């Protein structure tokens, strides 16, 4: 059995976003305005002081940085249509 390559990330690969509070850098991809994928690495997990307190593994300061990066165009939204 062979596995095929997943080409979904080719059109819009994850982009780095750094937290303003702790400088933890994660990879972020937005499939839509409502959906955000965050890839944590060991260094980012170690740097973020809020992961132990936040039940959903997303620090409020990092969420804010992701929102700003999205609004300024630093992160492309795959489905760029805004809901509203």
Image (cartoon, rainbow, N blue to C red):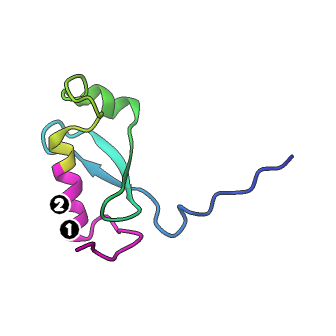
Q: In which quarter of the image is residue 68?
A: bottom left
Q: Which residue is drawn at 23% across and 61% down?
A: 69
In the rendered image, the vertical position of residue 35 relative to residue 40, given as above or below: below
Q: In this view, does 61 lie to the left or right of 2?
A: left
Residue at the extreme right = 1
Q: Contact (CB < 8 A) between labels 2 and 1?
A: yes
- Horizontal and vertical percent position of residue 5: 69, 57
Q: Which quadrant: the C terminus?
A: bottom left
User: How many other residues sit within 10 Å of disc 1, few (<14), some (14-19) or many (≥20)?
Assistant: few
Residue 71, numbered label = 1
Q: Give the range drawn in magenta.
A: 64-84
Q: Let me know if residue 71 is in the magenta part.
A: yes
Q: 6 or 16: which is nearer to us? A: 6
Q: Residue at x 27, y 74 (%)?
A: 82
Q: Residue at x 34, y 53 (%)?
A: 16
In the rendered image, the vertical position of residue 82 relative to residue 69, given as above or below: below
Query: Secondary structure beneath disc 1?
Result: helix
- Horizontal and vertical percent position of residue 83: 27, 72
Q: Quadrant of residue 71?
A: bottom left
- Horizontal and vertical percent position of residue 9: 53, 61
The answer for how far apart the CA atoms under marks 2 and 1 are is: 5 Å
- Horizontal and vertical percent position of residue 64: 16, 51
Residue at the extreme bottom = 81
Residue 68, numbered label = 2
Q: Is residue 2 left or right of residue 9?
A: right
Q: Is residue 12 left or right of residue 84?
A: right
């Amino acid at each position: 059995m062979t596995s095929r390559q997943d080409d979904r990330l080719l059109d819009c690969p994850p982009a780095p976003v750094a937290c303003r509070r702790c400088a933890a850098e994660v990879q972020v991809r937005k499939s839509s305005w409502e959906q955000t994928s965050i890839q944590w690495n060991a260094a980012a997990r170690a740097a973020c002081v809020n992961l132990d307190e936040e039940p959903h593994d997303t620090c409020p300061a990092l969420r804010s940085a992701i929102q700003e990066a999205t609004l300024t165009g630093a992160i492309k939204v795959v489905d760029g249509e805004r809901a509203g």
